[in-house]
Amino acid sequence: MKKVLSLTTLVLAISCSTVLADGNAFTPIDFETSNVSSKPAAAATTSQAGNTQLQNAILQLDNAQVEVRNELLNYKSQYSDIDAQYQTIRAERKALKKQVTTTEKRIKKIDKQKENIRKNINQV
């Protein structure tokens, strides 16, 4: 919100300086000598139209930035969900691997006991 406010203030300051740079804002109008040509009025209109276009472009960029930030938030939330699933699966995998190794050790122990019993039977 602060960025939007500061950006708006900056745009207003630039547009005001452009308008005031055209001439003295407090120049009295002399109605008797009307040597006013249409070119300065057209230049002022062009300047105002240009400022309006710049302001519209800035607003469009602001809107695009908001959309991209929302998209980033969606990606971050999806990433954190998948990361949590990944961590859970890693923990389950580690636990199952440990169970597999302990079960394999039990099978080897039983095999050794069977071999010892067979040896003892053959010796008797």
Image (spheres, helix red, strand yellow):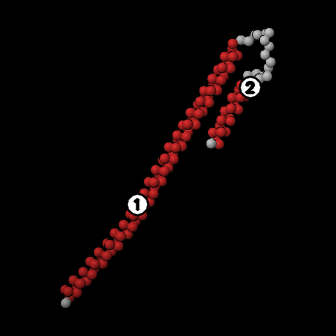
Rendered view: 24 above or below 37? below
- Going from N to C along the chain, the mark reached first, 1 or 2, is 2
Q: Is label 1 in a helix, a strand or a loop?
A: helix
Q: Amino acid at mark 1?
A: Ile
Residue found 50% across the figure and 43% down from its top: 71
Rendered position, 61 above or below 105:
above
Q: Based on the displayed image, in which of its 4 quarters is residue 123 positioned?
A: bottom left
Asked which quadrant contains residue 101, the reply is bottom left
Residue 12 point in image, percent of width and height: 68, 32
Would you say the residues marked 1 and 2 are in contact, meaning their CB atoms lie under 8 Å apart?
no
In the picture of the structure, the residue carrying the numbered disc 1 is 89
The residue at the point 46 percent across, 50 percent down is 78
Q: Is residue 15 left or right of residue 120?
A: right
Residue 58 lies, in percent from the top left, at 60, 33
In terms of secondary structure, where does tag 2 sit? helix
Q: Nearer the viewer, mark 1 or mark 2?
A: 2
- Give 49 or 86, whichever is nearer the viewer: 49
Quarter of the figure that contains the N terminus: top right
**Marker disc for residue 64:** none
In the image, 102 versus 113, the foreground residue is 102
The picture quadrant where one finds residue 21 is top right
Q: Report the number of numbered marks.
A: 2
The crowding category of the residue bearing disc 1, from other C-alpha atoms within 10 Å (few below 14, some 14 to 19, many at least 20), is few
**Distance (Cα) linking label 1 and label 2:** 66 Å
* Image side of residue 32 versus residue 13, left or right: right
Q: Is residue 50 left or right of residue 123?
A: right
Image quarter where the C terminus lies is bottom left
| Residue at 59%, 30% in the rendered image | 56
Name the mark on residue 20: 2
* Residue type, label 2: Leu
Tell me if residue 51 comes above or below residue 67 in the rendering. above
